[in-house]
Amino acid sequence: MIPVLILLAATACQQAYGAGSVESAPPPAPVSEAEHHRLAFVQAACGGCHAVEAPGLSPNSQSPPFADIANREGLTRATLVTWLTDAHNYPEVMDFDLDQPQVEEIADYILTLRSDGYKRVPD
């Protein structure tokens, strides 16, 4: 009798939680080739220290996730471009330069991570 009850319970779970009965996350929206290249560039240039996709923890604990940057109060594209352009803002360990198109590409990408009700990932 007990094996029958276990079988019935397992079947009930499969019915309740099986394919088609539980809502799953929608498939990711198609990404254009340009967006794919932009993410690849940002990941290659910045992903060694920053979490470039949300949610995420940065590989370097002293480097804020890009979503945290994007959701800072008062941040505008202009202030972000200015900050990225001023090389004196980069820590010496970065030892890297960005040309203006790269600055704008990174700034535009970061701004795509803005979201209403964003909650900063705790340290």
Image (cartoon, grey):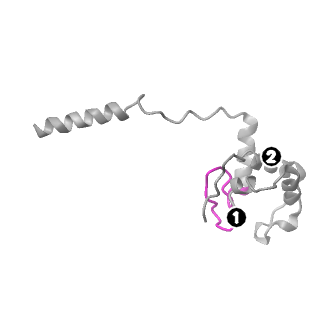
Residues 54 and 114: in front is 114
| Residue 73, image x, y percentages | 77, 56
Q: Secondary structure at mark 1?
A: loop
Secondary structure character of the magenta stretch overall = loop
Examine the structure image and report whether residue 12 is included in the region drawn in magenta: no
Q: Secondary structure at mark 2?
A: helix
Q: Amino acid at mark 1?
A: Ser
| Residue 34, image x, y percentages | 76, 37
- Above or below residue 29? Residue 80 is below
Residue lying furthest top: 20
| Residue 97, image x, y percentages | 84, 60
* Residue beneath disc 2: 108
Q: How many marks?
A: 2
Q: From mark 2 to mark 1, how far is it between C-alphas?
A: 19 Å
- Above or below residue 73? Residue 95 is below
Question: Residue 63 has which mark?
Answer: 1
Q: Is residue 13 left or right of residue 30?
A: left
Residue segment shown in magenta: 46-62
Q: Quadrant of residue 72?
A: bottom right
**Residue at x 74% of width, y 50% of height:** 42
Image quadrant containing the C terminus: bottom right
Mark positioned earlier in the residue sequence (2 or 1): 1
- Above or below residue 20? Residue 122 is below
Label 2, residues with CA under 10 Å away: few <14, some 14-19, many ≥20: some
Q: Quadrant of residue 4?
A: top left
Q: Amino acid at mark 2?
A: Asp
Question: Residue 51 has which mark?
Answer: none
